[in-house]
Image (cartoon, rainbow, N blue to C red):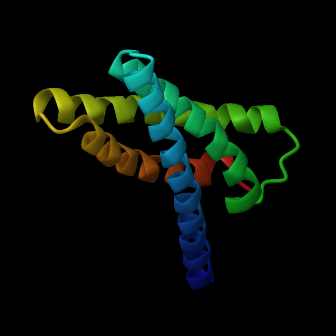
């Protein structure tokens, strides 16, 4: 039984990663547009990209990764966004530390921050948002 649970969780993590990768494209795309084209401050641009990606990630994780049939979509979406907002705080903190303190390239630091937040988001969403 433990082996099946482990495989099931591992498979969900891979699917979560695929959805997350699509979210990275959305996140980077909107962050780039906001920061470079619209000249919005980089941390606000980061928040915009992150939030739009979180919304698309909710949809794809609900239907594909976790196969949620929860009829209370607003509550589930609210939970997902709450977890994502905490993830945004973690993301911004890591980004700020790496850019401001360690002098990393903004986009390299953003990629690292996304990796950290991916682990946070998966574990908490698996055990809180999409509990079956």
Image label count: 0
Question: Can residue 85 be spotted in the picture?
Answer: no
Residue 65 vs 46, above or below: the answer is below
Is 93 on the left or on the right of 19, as rendered?
Answer: left
| Vertical comparison of 26 with 92: above or below | below
The residue under the point 57% across, 39% down is 53
Q: Residue at x 20, y 38 (%)?
A: 105
Q: Quadrant of the C terminus?
A: bottom right
- Image quarter where the N terminus lies is bottom right
Quick one: 52 or 1, which is closer to the camera? 52
Q: Residue furthest right?
A: 71
Name above or below for residue 19 compared with residue 128. Answer: below
Q: Residue at x 57, y 69 (%)?
A: 9
Mark yes or no: residue 19 visible: yes
Judged left or right of residue 70, residue 18 is left
Q: Position of residue 93 (x, y in %)?
A: 30, 30
Percent across and percent down for residue 80 are: 63, 38
Residue 22 point in image, percent of width and height: 56, 52
Above or below, comparing residue 1 to residue 50 in the picture: below
**Would residue 83 appear left or right of 119 to someone viewing this image?**
right
Q: Quadrant of residue 56?
A: top right
């Amino acid at each position: 039984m433990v082996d099946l649970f482990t495989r099931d969780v591992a498979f969900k993590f891979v699917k979560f990663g695929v959805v997350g990768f699509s979210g990275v494209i959305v996140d980077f795309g909107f962050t780039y547009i906001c920061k470079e084209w619209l000249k919005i401050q980089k941390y606000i641009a980061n928040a915009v990209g992150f939030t739009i990606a979180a919304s698309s990630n909710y949809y794809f994780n609900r239907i594909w990764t976790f196969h949620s049939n929860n009829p209370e979509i607003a509550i589930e979406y609210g939970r997902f966004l709450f977890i994502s907002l905490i993830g945004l705080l973690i993301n911004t903190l890591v980004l700020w530390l790496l850019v401001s303190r360690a002098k990393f390239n903004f986009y390299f630091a953003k990629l690292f921050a996304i990796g950290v937040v991916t682990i946070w988001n998966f574990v908490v969403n698996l055990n809180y948002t999409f509990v079956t």
